[in-house]
Image (spheres, rainbow, N blue to C red):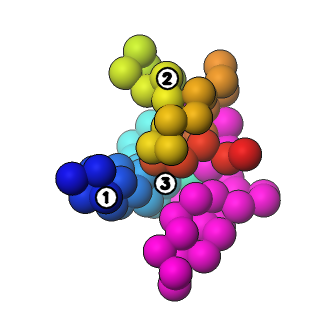
Amino acid sequence: MKRIMFIIITLISVFAISYSSDTITITADPKFKNPASKDFSIGIGSPAIDKALGTPLSTKDFTDFTRDSKPDIGAIEYK
């Protein structure tokens, strides 16, 4: 179940990066580390770093890493 949630969150994150009607839309490559090996964590220089709007429900990422005051878009916080 945790793997399914990871996939869903990742897909939602990719969609959020590529489509939105607000002023913080990111339409660039999210620069996943290794999507061919199913590693969808974001890499160096990703436009998703520090761009999420934090919510009380997103204080930790998929790996249980605590999100800071400027969270990243996606299931896994950049480390």
Please name the amino acid that badge 2 sits on: Thr
Q: Nearer the viewer, mark 1 or mark 2?
A: 1
Query: If you read the primary sequence from the N terminus, does the residue marked by circle 1 or circle 2 appear first?
Result: 1
Q: Which residue is mark 1?
A: 3
Q: Which residue is mark 3?
A: 17
- Choose top left, top right, bottom left or bottom right for residue 44: bottom right
The answer to whether residue 62 is above or below residue 15 is above
- Count the marks: how many? 3
Q: Nearer the viewer, mark 2 or mark 3?
A: 2
Please name the amino acid that badge 3 sits on: Ile
Q: Quadrant of the C terminus?
A: top right
Crowd around label 1: few <14 · some 14–19 · many ≥20 (10 Å): few
Indicate the position of residue 66 as horizontal and vertical percent values: 59, 27
Q: Which mark is residue 59?
A: 2
Q: Main secondary structure of the magenta part?
A: loop
Q: Residue at x 41, y 15 (%)?
A: 56
Indicate the position of residue 32 as horizontal and vertical percent values: 60, 67
Q: Which mark is residue 67?
A: none
33 part of magenta stretch: yes
- Choose top left, top right, bottom left or bottom right for residue 72: top right
Please name the amino acid that badge 1 sits on: Arg
Residue placed farthest to the top in the image? Answer: 56
